[in-house]
Amino acid sequence: MIVATVGHAVSTEMGLASLHAADSGVKALAFGKLESLVCLMQETPVSRLLPTLAEKLKAGTTLHELTAAGALANARTFGGEDYIGFHTMMALSPALHMSSEMPAAQRALPVFKVLYRNTNRIQEKGGRTAEVLHPVPEEAAGTKHDTQTLRAAVHRKDVTAAEQAFAALSKSSPADAFNHLLHTVQDNTDVHRVVLPYRAWDLMGLIGVDHAHTLLRQSVRFCVRAESHTPNATWNEPRTLLPRLMEQHKLMGRELGTRTPDDAWVEAFSITLFKSTAVQAAEAAAAALAEGIAPGAVSEAVSLAANQLCLRDHGRKPSEEQAGKPVGSVHGDSIGVHACDSANAWRNMARVSNTRNTFACVILGAYQMALDRGARGGDFLNWQPLPVQYQLDQVKETKQEDLLRAAEEAIRQNLQSRTAAVIHRYGDLKLPARPVFDLMLRYAVSEDGALHAEKFYRTTAEEFAATRAAFRWRLLVALGRVTASEYGRPAPGMDEARALVKS
């Protein structure tokens, strides 16, 4: 009653919030040696969080440890069931990757930015008193589980049974748990359903696998809640389409292909996928895999097709305008950003999963890209990609420093087309990519980005590294455009963070 009266932040300072959680009768999920840091992330008033984190760093706590604690605090509080919460979780591994690209004095900034958002949201939802994840209830001895018992529990919206099944499947190894989970993830291609498990997997590579079950079980709960969504015409389509294509093309039990096609094939196939319906794109991807084309080459074509959605998007319509996302903007949950993040997640999950799931992820990556192109609105087949010739003709600069200066000026004026043209010209001149990434990184850290700045920067960095030279500059052009769209909305807490690290 006192907590409800004075509010969570004040009750935390009085030591009441933790007491309430401990006395609630519900057993708390604990995280061993990280537990005190996890509690710090949940209980420290957000007004005092960044100075506290700075003190921890000075005392020897690492950014990896802070990120791990933030991820576990997020999981324990939200369990994959809160929109801002799971977006914040998906930003943690990108933020930690970004920190490694920054000057030593500034490396804390991207991590501090996301941890500030994390704790703020945790306390908005009630902190320790509102935790979603608890120890999984024990089952009767001898209970057996497999991939299908997990899927069946999710389909009937039985969260306890689904959690018990996944806990049992997680006992062998994180890799086995991940592969079992992917069968359930593949039942639908919602962007968050797809990106959440990949970013959890990526986070394990950064902070270790000790808490793999906690990170991945968020996807189980997300999928259970998704079963209550009102289905549209394509909601359940992957559940029947994927097994049909796997059987039709005899992909079950088949080894992965190793044929690496040339640039012309990748370009032509990406155009084929882009122009296809979702079902046609899935069929084309399955046929290419059956012909022995390497999965990475098919995924590359999917990524390039998704990139076209970023380059062609006309931006938000007046009916889609929201705070922080004005008419014409393409940052945040835009069609292009979502499509690129999804394609990246499918591509990376295909890379680290077993053979069956590799085939499935590549096929569904093609399906989802084409579904985004056709189902979310917009005349993408007729809209032309940036940069347009008019803007290219206006780029007179030829020296590296002049082009970088022009790109930054365009970003700071929210000139999406101008930014795209300058970066395209920079790439045409075969100038080094790192200075452009450094420019984009600066704004991916400083700007709010409507929950997507960190993810999309990291998506671009990963795809750029994995894409052949003939095509990779398109990805940076798209990142430049999105950066110009999001500029002018500074991230909460960033001024304080900069003062603390004196950058």
Image: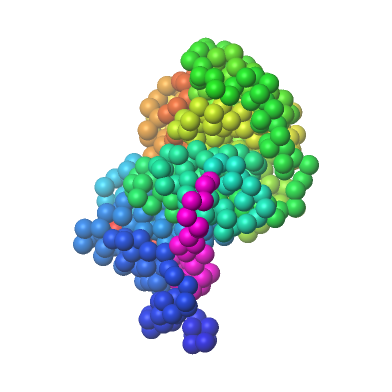
Q: Nearer the viewer, residue 213 or 161?
A: 161
What range of the chain is rendered magenta?
116-145
Question: What colouring style does the render use?
Answer: rainbow
Residue depicted at 40% across the width and 25% down the height: 431
Residue depicted at 59% across the width and 22% down the height: 251
The magenta stretch spans residue 289: no
Q: Residue 313: percent from the left, percent from the top?
A: 66, 37
The magenta stretch spans residue 134: yes
Which quarter of the rendered picture does the C terminus lie within? bottom left
Query: Would residue 457 be visible to someone looking at this image?
Result: no
Left or right: residue 430 compared with residue 323: left
Q: Residue 275: percent from the left, percent from the top?
A: 71, 25
Residue depicted at 54% across the width and 29% down the height: 356
Residue depicted at 51% across the width and 31% down the height: 350
Left or right: residue 45 compared with residue 195: left
Left or right: residue 23 compared with residue 341: left
Q: Nearer the viewer, residue 67 or 155?
A: 155
Q: Nearer the viewer, residue 148 or 479?
A: 148
Q: Which residue lies furthest to the front in this view?
A: 142
Vertical placement of residue 427 versus 123, above or below: above
Q: Residue 206: percent from the left, percent from the top?
A: 35, 45
Q: Which residue lies furthest to the left in this view?
A: 59
Vertical placement of residue 354 versus 56, above or below: above
Image quadrant in which you'd find residue 62: bottom left
